Amino acid sequence: MNTVEELYETLIQGILENGYGVADDFLTADEMLPLASRLRARRAQGQFRTAGMGNQQVVVEAQIRGDEIQWLSESDLTPDEAVFWQRVQAFMDYVNRTCYLGLRESEFHYALYPPGTFYKRHLDQFRTDSRRKLSVICYLNPDWEEHDGGQLAIYLPQAAGQERTELVVPKGGRLVCFESGRLEHEVLPATRERLSLTGWLKTA
Ligand SMILES: O=C(O)CCC(=O)C(=O)O
Ligand SMILES: [Fe+2]
């Protein structure tokens, strides 16, 4: 079993060496499953909304993204959500001590992609707001298999204008992190509902 510092170090090394980091078991199954249930319960209560594009005006654009989301509010976390929240805050503190990114704030939402939906290739920074420094996605999918699809495709710039595509399987408990302003990425369609907690670590 990894210590949390080892998980944080794995993520940071991944970002420095490959542009993105992946930590399996960021959440244990015991930590992840209650969050998946919480997501479904909140959605059943009608708290989820079709996600919009950009921060200027919310244009619902099913051609671009098909996920439904709900933002977390720090003042309204269940104990299970607080475990995740605190682990992310500790990661943010660790990054600030080791990489001097000046991260001060975070924002997270649950996301559910119904089967067949996707999020086309995009960058996570808004033209009008560059405070998002690190994108963080934690998957809440028990028993996810490669043939279920739903991979996160990450486009890595290479020398001479080339690029390489890497695919991350959205396995439950796994966390992916990359620089929001640098890496374009895409969510591929899945054959099952695809659950996650997605967020950004931001400067003030
Ligand atoms: O769920 C993922 O793997 C990525 C989600 C994403 O790119 C986003 O919400 O901006
Ligand atoms: Fe994204």
Image (cartoon, rainbow, N blue to C red):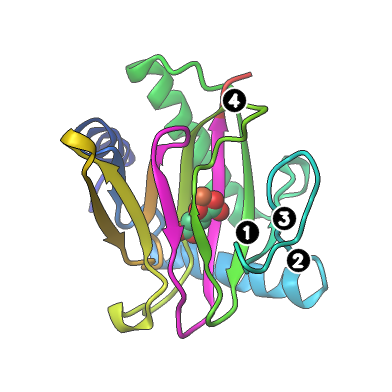
Who's the residue at 31% across and 42% down the image? 20
Would you identify the image quadrant in which residue 139 lies? bottom left
Neighbours of disc 3 within 10 Å: few (<14), some (14-19), many (20+): some
Q: Amino acid at mark 3?
A: Gly
Neighbours of disc 1 within 10 Å: few (<14), some (14-19), many (20+): many
Mark closer to the chain start, 1 or 4? 1
Which secondary structure lies at badge 1? Answer: strand
Q: Which residue is mark 4?
A: 131
Q: Nearer the viewer, mark 4 or mark 2?
A: 4
Q: Which residue is mark 3?
A: 52
Mark closer to the chain start, 4 or 2? 2
Q: Amino acid at mark 2?
A: Phe
Who's the residue at 42% across and 45% down the image? 184
Q: Position of residue 114 (x, y in %)?
A: 59, 78
Q: Position of residue 82 (x, y in %)?
A: 61, 48
CB of mark 3 within 8 Å of CB of mark 1? no
Who's the residue at 62% across and 35% down the image? 126
Q: Is residue 27 above or below residue 130?
A: below
Residue numbers of the magenta segment:
178-201
Question: Is-magenta flag for residue 36?
Answer: no
Q: Establish whether ligand 1 lies closer than 8 Å to the Cβ of label 2.
A: no
Q: Which residue is mark 1?
A: 110
CB of mark 4 within 8 Å of CB of mark 2? no
CB of mark 1 within 8 Å of CB of mark 2? yes
Would you identify the image quadrant in which residue 94 lies? top left
Q: Establish whether ligand 1 lies closer than 8 Å to the Cβ of label 4.
A: no
Number of marks in the rendered image: 4
